């Protein structure tokens, strides 16, 4: 398996030689994998790129991309990821800083977690065993902690200790190669929030490992001055987009409900078919409608175009929908009525349906329309 460690640089002449030698020493003991380094330099005026070129003959696993000018942290990583996938046959890409705030010794731990089946490994400063520098001021600590809480609550993400860490490993096949990197919401620090959301939406198995985030050894921090505002803007824009998708999902679901009811009435009243069977026929009509319009509209950015994929996913959609109706909606109604009686059965129906809607949206967005091949 090929790991490509992407390292953006700007004026890192004081760090880069030591960084390369440290990474090479730490990764030399990793067996069964190929480790390559990809530097993306923002045309550093201090000669960082020249130092990297000087070391390339000594180590045969170093590539260098030089931007015309410094475009931001996110832009550098996006450039690196695209190059690593298209030109370096990367199986996994690792995001890592050049200033020794990320410990090169942790790279071996990222590899282990990928080997154990993780798709997205997060180096967490806030999980048990992780840390941030003790001499950080209150303002920086507050921004890190508050930013994590805000991101999780607003975006309704799985419980993760560190949403804004910059030390991560991403599996390519089925995950990173399915993400439209050119349309991430930020070219700065906040790119990582959108990338995390995309990995979650594509069903990535996430694993956190504790890391000790260090102070810079040399040089000046490259943190953009507008980082807090950019992060706030990105999180809110993603929330709005997700809300739009959910609203579309509800509209499609309402159309399906109408089709279900009309089909039920038609087959029961006209053909005198048993109500239970009439409902099943109407429900299948709703499932067909829901699949078609969700594919064409709600999840249009991930729609199934290939006929084989369309049909296979339709079968999956049917099975997921049936499971939800039988075991979640009907199951909850049964439980509610068993404990509280049937007098409030209408209320129980709507409560169970609300849970079903959340289940359906989660399964459809993370499984049915999870990773679609770009055509």
Image (cartoon, helix red, strand yellow):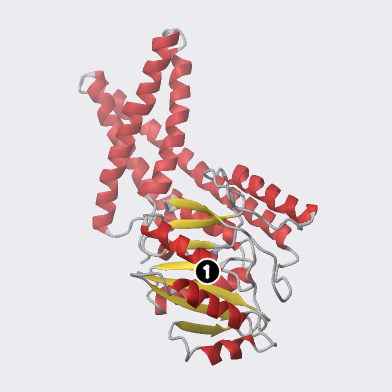
Which residue is located at x 59 percent, y 66 percent? 102
Q: Which residue is mark 1?
A: 182
Circle 1: element type: helix
How far from the left and from the top, in percent, is residue 184? 55, 63
Residue that extends furthest to the right in the rendered view of this protein: 138
Q: Is residue 136 above or below residue 74?
A: above
Is residue 293 shown above or below 280?
Answer: below
Residue 368 position, x and y percent, is: 35, 48
- From this view, report whether residue 20 is shown above or below residue 320: below
Which is nearer the eye, 262 or 167?
167
How many marks are shown on the rendered structure?
A: 1
Q: Residue at x 41, y 55 (%)?
A: 118
User: Could you tell me which quadrant the N terminus lies in?
Assistant: bottom left
Q: Is residue 104 visible?
A: yes
Quarter holding the C terminus? bottom left
Judge left or right: residue 115 versus residue 245.
left
User: Position of 235 compared to 56: left or right?
Assistant: right
Position of residue 12 in the picture relative to residue 331 (left or right): right
Q: Based on the displayed image, in which of its 4 quarters is residue 16 positioned?
A: bottom right
Tell me if residue 261 can be seen: no
């Amino acid at each position: 398996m090929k790991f490509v460690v992407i390292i953006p640089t700007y004026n890192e002449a004081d760090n880069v030689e030591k960084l390369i030698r440290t990474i090479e020493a730490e990764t030399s003991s990793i067996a069964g994998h190929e480790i390559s380094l990809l530097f993306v330099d923002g045309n550093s005026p201090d000669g960082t790129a020249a130092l990297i070129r000087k070391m390339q003959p000594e180590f045969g696993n170093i590539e260098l991309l030089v931007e015309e000018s410094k475009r931001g942290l996110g832009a550098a990583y996006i450039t690196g990821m695209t190059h690593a996938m298209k030109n370096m046959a990367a199986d996994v890409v690792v995001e890592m800083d050049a200033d020794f705030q990320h410990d090169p010794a942790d790279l071996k731990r990222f590899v282990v977690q990928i080997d154990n089946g993780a798709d997205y490994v997060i180096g967490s400063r806030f999980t048990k065993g992780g840390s941030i520098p003790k001499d950080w001021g209150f303002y920086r600590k507050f921004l890190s902690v508050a930013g994590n809480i805000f991101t999780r609550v607003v975006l309704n993400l799985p419980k993760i200790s560190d949403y804004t860490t910059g030390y991560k490993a991403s599996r390519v096949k089925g995950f990173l190669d399915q993400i439209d990197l050119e349309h991430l919401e930020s070219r700065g620090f906040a790119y990582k929030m959108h990338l995390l959301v995309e990995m979650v939406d594509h069903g990535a198995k996430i694993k956190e490992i504790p890391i000790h985030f260090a102070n810079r050894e040399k040089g000046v921090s490259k943190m953009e001055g507008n980082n807090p505002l950019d992060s706030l803007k990105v999180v809110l824009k993603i929330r709005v987009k997700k809300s739009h998708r959910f609203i579309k999902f509800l509209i499609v679901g309402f159309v399906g409900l109408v089709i279900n009811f009309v089909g039920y009435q038609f087959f029961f009243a006209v053909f005198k078919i048993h109500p239970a069977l009439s409902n099943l026929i109407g429900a299948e009509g709703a499932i067909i409608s829901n699949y078609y319009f969700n594919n064409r509209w709600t999840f249009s950015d991930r729609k199934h175009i290939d006929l084989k994929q369309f049909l296979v996913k339709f079968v999956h959609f049917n099975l997921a929908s049936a499971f939800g109706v039988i075991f979640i909606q009907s199951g909850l109604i049964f439980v509610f009525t068993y404990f509280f009686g049937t007098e409030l059965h209408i209320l129980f129906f709507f409560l169970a349906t609300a849970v079903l809607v959340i289940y359906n949206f989660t399964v459809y967005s993370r499984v049915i329309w999870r990773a679609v091949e770009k055509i």
